[in-house]
Image: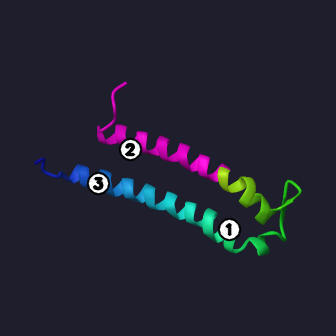
Amino acid sequence: MAQVTEKMREYWRRNMIVTTWIMVIWFVVTFVAAFFATGLNSFTFIRFPFGFYMAAQGSLIVYVVLIFFYAWKMNKLDREYGVHEEG
């Protein structure tokens, strides 16, 4: 069994920080925006009530951005810690 090095612990810690922040953003976009949809409807975005927009389009856009950000950030971390895939 491989011994866990300090470098591996640091990689895992940074991985968990990125994952935690992405999950916090996901939670806010998914549940907090839906919970406060009535209040958010007092704002308009592209001539739509903001609560409606977040439910119909905004949350999907945020999810796609989160996916691309996570892939970019994890590839960067993988290269930094030498655990990236060749190719």
The amino acid type, in three-letter code, at marker 1 is Ala
| Tag of residue 77 | 2
What residue is drawn where x is 42% and y is 44%? 74
The amino acid type, in three-letter code, at marker 2 is Leu
For this view, does 64 lie left or right of residue 37?
left
Task: Kindly check if marks 1 and 3 are in contact, taking CB atoms under 8 A apart as contact.
Answer: no
Mark 1: few, some, or many residues within 10 Å (few <14, many ≥20)? some
For this view, does 33 lie left or right of residue 10?
right
Q: Position of residue 72 (x, y in %)?
A: 49, 41
Q: Which residue is mark 3?
A: 10
Task: Compare marks 3 and 2 and give the one earlier in the sequence.
Answer: 3
Instruction: Kindly report the distance in space between the C-alpha atoms of the residues bearing marks 1 and 2.
Output: 31 Å
Task: Compare marks 1 and 3 and give the one earlier in the sequence.
Answer: 3
For this view, does 54 lie left or right of residue 86?
right
Instruction: Kindly report the distance in space between the C-alpha atoms of the residues bearing marks 3 and 2.
Output: 10 Å
What residue is drawn where x is 50% and y is 61%? 23
Q: Is residue 67 magenta?
A: yes
**Vertical order, 36 against 12 (above or below):** below
Q: Main secondary structure of the magenta part?
A: helix
| Tag of residue 33 | 1
Nearer the viewer's eye, disc 1 or disc 3? 1
The amino acid type, in three-letter code, at marker 3 is Glu
Tell me the element at label 2: helix
Mark 3: few, some, or many residues within 10 Å (few <14, many ≥20)? few
Q: Which residues are magenta?
A: 61-87
For this view, does 87 lie left or right of residue 60?
left
